[in-house]
Amino acid sequence: MKLHKALVAASVAALALMGCAPGGEGSAISASQIGGESPSALSSAAPVIDGATLRGYMAYDYDIAESAAALASRLPYAFLAEVVGWSDGYSVLEHVEESGLAVASRTALLEVKVTESFAGTPVPRGSTVYVDFARGVENVAADGSTDPRTSGAIPVEALRLAAPAGSRFLFVGYPGVDPADQIYAEYITVEGAGVGLPEGATVVTPHPQGMLFETAGGDFVSARTGDADVRGWGGSFDALLSELRAMGK
């Protein structure tokens, strides 16, 4: 099954169970709660991060890594970055011929500046990288309209508020997927491919455990999978960085 189909199925199931508004566990993982290192002075100035909004209704089926280093050791990208800005990404539409409806898998494009890279990551400090960020699904009527009351797609503006410019996060993941590769049947179409991307841009996709934002006080919160899947990963955001630095470059 293609990745976006798995995410569509998971998101639709979540909508049925949870209603329409994003929510869920949004609290950061605290150094004081799990016995980690003291937060750095920089952490006190970290923006407030809304993890529940960032996660939305996304759900994943994957093998859980036991540490940040274990995850980074098997994936090509591991770096520390700072948010530059969010914009709308491409959409993958599955058309339902009988009804004229389509199910749209929406994405956002997150522009970031790499401030440190780990474990042989091929993006040096100062590089601009674009994160392909899945933001959920929604039904599209035959006339192209959508209903915000039933949408499972996180609005781009909500993402801007949930992780504003200047936010720091640890990224671990893969090269981005070419949107054209999502067209595997005649009822699939893609809209907006390549919008907002300069020529030769580096695009990456996070592992479910691979997008952890620093919060005030030195904590961290997951932007993709639930916080429970990374709860044992050290005691603070700085501890995660120290673990990856110890791997070498």
Image (tube, grey):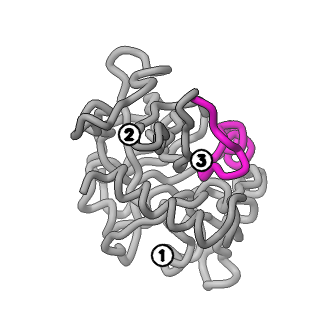
Q: Residue at x 42, y 37 (%)?
A: 93
Looking at the rendered structure, the kind of residue marked 2 is: Glu
Identify the element where label 1 is drawn. helix
Q: Give the quarter of the image for residue 10.
A: bottom left
Q: CA distance from mark 2 to mark 1?
A: 39 Å
Q: Nearer the viewer, residue 73 or 162?
A: 162
> Does 79 sit left or right of 23 as displayed?
left
Q: Residue at x 57, y 60 (%)?
A: 57
User: Looking at the image, is mark 3 or mark 2 earlier in the sequence?
Assistant: 2
Q: CA distance from mark 1 to mark 3?
A: 23 Å
Looking at the rendered structure, the kind of residue marked 1 is: Asp
Q: Main secondary structure of the magenta part?
A: loop
Q: Kindly identify which residue carries mark 2.
A: 97
> Does 161 sit left or right of 105 as displayed?
right
Would you say the residues marked 2 and 1 are in contact, meaning their CB atoms lie under 8 Å apart?
A: no
Identify the element where label 2 is drawn. loop
Q: Kindly identify which residue carries mark 3.
A: 153
Q: Is residue 147 magenta?
A: yes
Place of residue 1 in the rendered image (x, y in percent of width and height, measured from the top left)? 24, 57
Identify the element where label 3 is drawn. loop
Q: Give the quarter of the image for residue 24.
A: bottom right
